[in-house]
Image: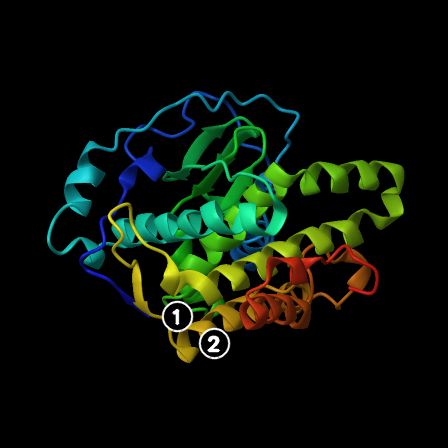
Amino acid sequence: MELNENARVDTSQVDDRRGSGGGGGMGIPIPIGGGRGGIVGIIIAVLVALVGGGFGLNAATNGGGSEQGDNTSLEQKCSAQDALKQLDCRNALYVNSIQAYWRTAMPEAFGEQYRPSKTVFFSQNVSTACGAADSGVGPFYCPADDLVYIDLSFYKLLADQLGAEGEFAQPYVLAHEYGHHVQDLLGTEAQMRRQQQRDPQSANALSVKLELQADCYAGAWAKNATGTADDKGQKIFTSITEQDISQAIDTAEKIGDDAIQQRSGRPVNPDEFTHGSSEQRKQWFTKGFTTGDLKSCDTFGSGA
């Protein structure tokens, strides 16, 4: 993967709350991990990561989410000559590429206009319209405020604890979360929730379909990423290699439900899957990448 050093990093697509104290004063964060540390904490983080994490929060809890970050230092850093050496600037540029793709792809594929969403950079804890959250939940999308949230330290956990070390794991993470944003805009997520209410026994299976579709959408973005450009027409990526795609697939496999269960020392139980097996996640990301066709990502279709 090679980013274009001449591409402009549009930091207006990011809300940098890392210096704002996050969700301080909001009370107890939503208990995702039950307070347990070690491998269980890692597992819980990854269960929520890459799967639209806001759906794992209590969306009925009004956490506010009205805070605004201060992008001043980020803007300065990302305007510098060596901006792409910085983790936060690279991630802002990944967001730019993903949203540039959807601005064109969503109307073409679905006849609907894309509505941009910001990515919130936070550290330790954050206030959202889905409730209070901390870094333990991993990256997530909150449908109540239409924002993607990420503590960038998650990538270190992903590399050190799960072995997903490749750089392309990072844009894959973000592309998956923006896939959930698209599902929200199209009404897919809301329809899935209604189905879950009508048929509680199928709740996990329906959740898997939603997550695999987001993986497929991420693959479709990856297929078309080299065609994305900044607001001046400069290409954002100059190249994406087979190795990059392999890194994304490796990440997808490492956060499959069966891999998570095995890592926790539990027997693999498909009835408890909510995000898809390693093979399923690999299959649907690969399908999106191979075809580049969003219509091929119909995980809810008959026989999918």
Query: Circle 2 — which element?
Result: helix
Q: Residue at 71% of width from left, 65% of height from top?
A: 266
Q: Earlier in the sequence, mark 1 or mark 2?
A: 1
Q: Mark 1 — residue?
A: 166
Which part of the image, by quadrant, shows the C terminus? bottom right
Q: Which mark is residue 148?
A: none
Q: Residue at 54% of width from left, 69% of height from top?
A: 289
Question: Does residue 37 appear anywhere in the picture?
Answer: no
Question: Does residue 181 appear anywhere in the picture?
Answer: yes
Q: Position of residue 9 (x, y in %)?
A: 25, 47
Amino acid at pointer 2: Ser
Quadrant in which residue 191 is drawn: top right
Amino acid at pointer 1: Gly
Q: Mark 2 — residue?
A: 246
- In this figure, what is the number of numbered marks? 2
Q: Is residue 5 left or right of residue 291?
A: left
Q: State the CA–CA distance, disc 1 to disc 2.
A: 9 Å
Q: Residue at 37% of width from left, 53% of height from top?
A: 97
Which part of the image, by quadrant, shows the N terminus? bottom left
Asked whether the residues under the numbered discs 1 and 2 touch, taking CB atoms below 8 Å apart as contact, a structural biologist would say yes
Front-lying residue, 217 or 103: 103
Q: Position of residue 300 (x, y in %)?
A: 76, 54
